[in-house]
Amino acid sequence: MSNILNLIGRDQTLFTLDISANDDELKKRVSSSSFLVLGGAGSIGQAVTKEIFKRNPKKLHVVDISENNMVELVRDIRSSFGYIEGDFQTFALDIGSLEYDAFIKADGQYDYVLNLSALKHVRSEKDPFTLMRMIDVNIFNIDKTIQQSIDCGAKKYFCVSTDKAANPVNMMGASKRIMEMFLMRRSEQIPISTARFANVAFSDGSLLHGFNQRIQKQQPIVAPNDIKRYFVTPQESGELCLMSCIFGENRDIFFPKLSEALHLITFADIAVKYLEQRGYETYLCDNEDEARELAKTLPAQGKWPCLFTSSDTTGEKDFEEFFTDKETLDMTRFENLGVIKNDPVYQQALLELFEQQIVAYKKDQAWTKEQIVELFHKMIPGFGHKETGKYLDSKM
């Protein structure tokens, strides 16, 4: 943890005071409850699962489409925490599948359902087909699993949003903003809370996680030098989600209180710190060809080729924010957690339009990215989608 904190420019954890002040109640609630964690083998899902497991739940079932990540989750838990008396099981299932529906029908008895599944990459909006899957995972699977939770009598539903849902500029953030609209409708039938938070440092598939891969494969490190981001550690992401799940009131959105002066850092700055930790000096290259070529020889000299460039790809937001000036905040309940308070405000006709249009596209098995962008604009007036025609997959 201290290594990660140092890399993201912090010297202390975010939620220590809030966790310690509420830990007795957390243990009491968790140890007397049953949990279903969906998307539990992703980075945030694993962190949440571990926070629940170490507080001895009566039942903890974890579902994820990634069989390999699930194996690692179990190995990690057994190696760190051992065993609990409660019912701990994992299931390699696709939430959108018939098999998952049968799984819920066979049992389905959970006090808390936490959904951490998401398509989280801005690069997923580059083509209309992955974009449609993003809509399924980030919106419709959420809505479906909330209905199943209602039908099975769950006490509470939690799912994860993103800081990019506040004034979104990319389709991923916009999909999460639309998800929040669907949550408002469902919140009249079951208590729901959620969380918006920053980038999870070294989470699967992230640029920082890619640094590890580049070192292992002796390849150059590439990072933008003009984008500043907030980061939380994997454990902090799990703590934030559990706090929102257990203590969040209906429609609450939890977020970390992060100071711009203290916590914003560029990817390039992290890359330099990362290489220093591993005993390498940063060597700046002028282009990809030079970086690839020098990767063959420089590491043996204690230097690592890096390409730091400005960002020009679609969907990159110039700054990060967890809330808008139109949202009502409670900044006093917790020390380092802010809470957005929401009324059940939504436009039923707009949600129905969205559902009908997506169903029609799927029925025809034909749609374009432009059609979906136009639909998103109808859902989110003022949606600031930035299309540059360039995507991350066209870069090293």
Image (cartoon, grey):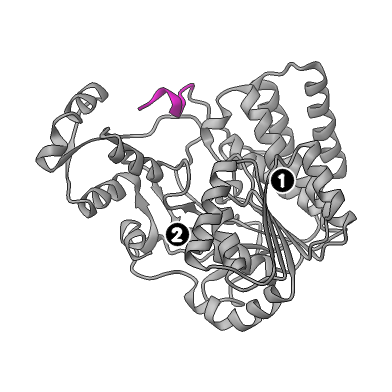
Front residue of this view, candidates 74 and 325? 74
Q: Is residue 42 above or below residue 256?
A: above
Q: Which residue is mark 2?
A: 233
The x and y percentages for residue 205 are 47, 40
Nearer the observer, disc 1 or disc 2? 2
Q: Could you tell me which residue is drawn at 40 percent across and 41 percent down?
A: 207
Q: Could you tell me which residue is drawn at 85 percent across and 30 percent down?
A: 356
Quarter occupied by residue 12? bottom left
For the magenta stretch, what is the residue range? 389-396
Chief secondary structure of the magenta span? loop
Front residue of this view, candidates 200 and 148? 148
The x and y percentages for residue 160 are 64, 53
Q: Is residue 21 above or below residue 49?
A: below
Q: Earlier in the sequence, mark 1 or mark 2?
A: 1
Report the side of 139 relative to 386 (left or right): right
Q: Is residue 306 magenta?
A: no
Report the side of 394 relative to 377 (left or right): left
The x and y percentages for residue 71 are 55, 48
Q: Which residue is mark 1?
A: 179
Quadrant of the rendering where the N terminus is positioned:
bottom left
Q: Is residue 275 above or below residue 311?
A: below
Alpha carbon distance from label 1 to label 2: 25 Å
Q: Could you tell me which residue is drawn at 14 percent across and 34 percent down?
A: 298
Secondary structure of the residue carrying tag 1 is helix
